[in-house]
């Protein structure tokens, strides 16, 4: 996994963002923990299954919809199925070896 440390991406309050399989991390958050790297690897797998661009469309649509429903961007973010799968399994470092295809669907 390629990780690029920098000062501005992602916004303050987030450690890292995965853009098309490349992880941008705030410099003060480096080195990323094995758990965070696993979280981002789960997202890369989700992106591959959705051919990348549809992943972002669904991600943003789900974030907006759930933020409105829960009246909170933070709660909306934590409710996105891609995030729910990643957070639920990030501490299992062998999760990706046993994960079934479309593993995020059961978190919708
Ligand atoms: Zn995430």
Image: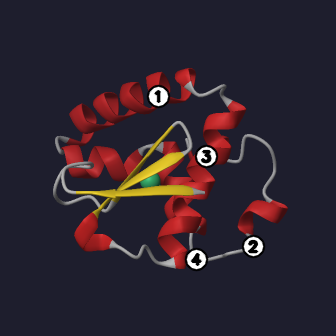
Q: Of callouts 2 and 1, which one flags the residue occurring earlier in the amino acid sequence?
A: 1
Where is residue 7? Give x, y as percent. Answer: 19, 56
Q: Can you identify the residue that label 2 sits on? A: 94
Give the foreground label among 3 and 4.
3
Q: How is the image coloured?
A: secondary structure
Q: Can you identify the residue that label 4 sits on? A: 91
For the residues labelled 3 and 2, the Cα–Cα distance comes to: 15 Å
Mark 1 CB near ligand 1 (8 Å cut): no
For the residues labelled 3 and 1, the Cα–Cα distance comes to: 11 Å
The structure residue drawn at horizontal position 48% and vertical position 26%, both measured from the top left corner, is: 58
On screen, 25 above or below 107?
below
Location of residue 108 (image quadrant): top right
Q: Of callouts 3 and 4, which one flags the residue occurring earlier in the amino acid sequence?
A: 3
Tell me the SS state at disc 3: helix
Camera-side residue of 80 and 23? 23
Query: Left of 17 or right of it: where is 106?
Result: right
For the residues labelled 1 and 4, the Cα–Cα distance comes to: 24 Å
The structure residue drawn at horizontal position 16% and vertical position 57%, both measured from the top left corner, is: 12
Where is residue 84? Give x, y as percent. Answer: 50, 54
Q: Can you identify the residue that label 3 sits on? A: 44
Q: Which mark is residue 56?
A: 1
Assess whether mark 4 and mark 2 are in contact (beta carbons under 8 angstroms).
no
Camera-side residue of 56 and 78? 56
Where is residue 37? Give x, y as percent. Answer: 53, 66
Query: Dot 2: within a 10 Å radius of its alpha carbon, few (fewer than 14), some, or many (20 or more) residues?
Result: few
Query: Dot 4: within a 10 Å radius of its alpha carbon, few (fewer than 14), some, or many (20 or more) residues?
Result: some
Camera-side residue of 85 and 18? 18
């Amino acid at each position: 996994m390629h990780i690029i440390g920098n000062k501005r991406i992602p916004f303050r309050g987030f450690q890292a963002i995965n853009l098309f399989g490349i992880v941008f991390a705030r410099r003060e958050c480096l080195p990323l923990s094995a758990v965070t790297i696993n979280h981002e690897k789960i997202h890369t797998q989700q992106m591959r299954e959705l051919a990348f661009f549809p992943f972002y469309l669904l991600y943003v649509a789900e974030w907006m919809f759930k933020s409105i429903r829960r009246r909170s961007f933070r709660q909306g973010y934590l409710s996105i199925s891609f995030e729910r799968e990643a957070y639920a399994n990030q501490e299992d470092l062998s999760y990706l070896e046993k994960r079934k295809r479309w593993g995020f669907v059961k978190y919708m």
